[in-house]
Image (spheres, grey):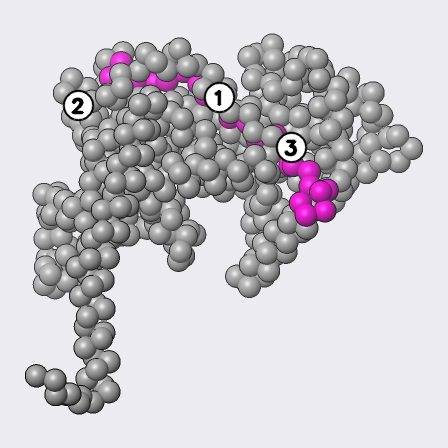
């Protein structure tokens, strides 16, 4: 009974490893999952009491279930069979391809990460970098929306900060799911983005099979009432002007929408603007076909250098924020009411007759976004300086022309974010910001646009160009 047993060291290590694995699999992992699930459920219960638009069951469904549901959707199966016939290959090969697409697209929403980490991080970064002015200006009107509707925020796209600002602005009202381009498909960023409810898309993919899988996911999410955010322009503006709308995502949402049977789809126009867009020079550079393409290493080095300088300024207590970041909301558009008023039923139309109607709706949404893009101090000062490129202006003359511009566009309903009380100081602060960035030169109290930086000044001026065009002015366009 007390005899000793001698075993080889490799067998001992193997037995220890098996014991550790059994302990991990049977005890530690289940208990950790239970603990995390309990925390997540507690967050969901707490958040649900204050959200205007509740988290949908679709968002809380396990990711693998959603992937299976998408892969085995009847329309996706038809697309698989058609592709297999056209390629003369086994159906299993095409189905494996579709499975890869589904895993790429379907998010894995985590309420704890979204509200406890994502919201906190977005708020801290946004407020560190900007004086954020955010609010649902039409709260009373928004309360009239059927809470069972599928809400879609449609917004202009000026910066990659839009994602963070949008998540921050909506966190007290709802959760947002939005499409993110392939630029963010790097580890660990893609895991975090999926956990926050976003989904990846290949914007310029001409693969019909991929487009069908993406279409069906968007249709499922919309039908289940998931609140979404859509950048109608499709990509970040390069010259600061609003771009023509892309119709693809709108068509996916509305192709099978039946006004009398389906839950309503409600579009809420959102306008975003910044006193400084972090990637402004890079965006303008892309407009130059002769510009040399920069390597990923150069981009990484420049980004890290910029972050390092910002951290140094924070440590030295010399940090200054990049001006204002502002968001405005416009009156919502109910698709149920829109369909009734215009006598259209998208579900009964073929592609040829449907797309002109989709384009009309997209143009109406873009017009609504135009009217709510906030007019910020830097845009106003840049507009005056770019328009008077060769002329020197004193601070007093500049203020007078900016004030005249404000009165001109306010008369047409432009949402100018300058109070009469602090207007002079805000104009002077904007001028100082442009001086610090060397976009404006000063000599003996006279200010002129730097001839080499007029294009960048025009970039900011173009954010309000649509208001100038209404008066017949000829604003400089980047």
Q: Which residues are magenta?
A: 314-337
Q: Residue at x 13, y 52 (%)?
A: 80
Mark 1 or 2, nearer chain start: 1
User: Does residue 407 appear in the picture of this structure?
Assistant: yes
Estimate how packed mark 3 is, as few (under 14), some (14 to 19) or many (20 or more) residues with alpha carbons within 10 Å: many
Per the image, the residue denoted by label 2 is 262
Mark 3 or 2, nearer chain start: 2
Q: Is residue 207 above or below residue 422?
A: below
Q: Residue at x 61, y 15 (%)?
A: 409
The part of the image, by quadrant, that contains residue 308 is bottom right
Tell me where residue 14 appears, x and y as whole percent.
Answer: 20, 79
Q: Is residue 234 above or below residue 32?
A: above
Q: Is residue 435 left or right of residue 314?
A: right
From this viewpoint, which residue is outermost toward the left? 1
| C-alpha separation, residue under disc 3 versus residue under disc 1 | 17 Å
How many marks the image carries: the answer is: 3
From this viewpoint, which residue is outermost toward the front? 2
Q: Is residue 90 above or below residue 143?
A: below
């Amino acid at each position: 009974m007390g005899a000793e047993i001698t075993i080889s060291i490799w067998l001992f290590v193997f037995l220890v490893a098996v014991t550790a694995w059994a302990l991990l699999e049977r005890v530690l992992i289940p208990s950790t999952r239970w603990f995390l699930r309990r925390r997540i459920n507690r967050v969901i219960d707490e958040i649900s009491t204050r959200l205007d638009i509740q988290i949908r069951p679709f968002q809380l469904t396990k990711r693998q279930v959603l992937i299976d549901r998408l892969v085995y959707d009847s329309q996706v199966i038809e697309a698989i069979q058609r592709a297999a016939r056209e390629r003369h290959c086994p159906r299993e090969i095409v189905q494996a391809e579709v499975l890869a697409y589904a895993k790429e697209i379907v998010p894995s929403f985590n309420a704890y990460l979204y509200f406890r980490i994502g919201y906190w991080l977005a708020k801290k970064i946004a407020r560190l970098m900007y004086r954020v002015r955010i609010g649902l200006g039409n709260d009373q009107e928004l309360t009239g929306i059927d809470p069972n509707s599928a809400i879609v925020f449609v917004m202009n796209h000026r910066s990659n900060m839009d994602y963070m600002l949008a998540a921050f602005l909506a966190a007290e009202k709802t959760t947002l799911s939005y499409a993110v381009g392939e630029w963010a498909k790097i580890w660990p960023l893609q895991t975090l983005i999926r956990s926050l409810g976003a989904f990846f898309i290949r914007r310029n993919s001409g693969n019909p099979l991929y487009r069908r899988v993406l279409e069906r996911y968007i249709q499922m999410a919309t039908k289940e009432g998931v609140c979404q955010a859509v950048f109608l322009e499709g990509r970040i503006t390069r010259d600061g002007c609003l771009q023509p709308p892309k119709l693809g995502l709108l068509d996916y949402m509305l192709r099978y929408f039946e006004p009398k049977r389906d839950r309503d789809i409600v579009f809420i126009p959102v306008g975003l603007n910044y006193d400084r867009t972090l990637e402004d020079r890079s965006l303008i550079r892309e407009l130059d076909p002769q510009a040399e393409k920069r390597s990923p290493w150069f981009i990484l080095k420049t980004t890290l250098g910029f972050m390092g300088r910002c951290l140094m300024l924070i440590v030295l207590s010399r940090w200054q924020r990049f001006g204002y970041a502002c968001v405005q909301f416009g009156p919502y558009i109910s698709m149920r009411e829109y369909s009734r008023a215009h006598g259209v039923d998208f579900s009964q139309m073929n592609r040829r007759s449907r797309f002109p109607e989709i384009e009309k709706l997209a143009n109406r949404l873009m017009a609504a976004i135009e009217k709510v893009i906030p007019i910020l101090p830097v845009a106003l000062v840049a507009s005056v300086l770019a328009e008077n490129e060769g002329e020197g202006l004193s601070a007093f003359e500049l203020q007078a022309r900016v004030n005249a511009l404000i009165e001109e566009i306010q008369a047409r309903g432009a949402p100018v974010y300058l109070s009469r009380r602090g207007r002079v100081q805000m104009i002077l602060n904007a001028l100082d910001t442009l001086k610090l960035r060397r976009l404006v030169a000063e000599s003996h109290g006279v200010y002129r646009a730097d001839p080499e930086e007029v294009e960048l000044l025009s970039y900011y001026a173009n954010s309000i160009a649509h208001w100038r065009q209404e008066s017949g002015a000829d604003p400089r366009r980047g």
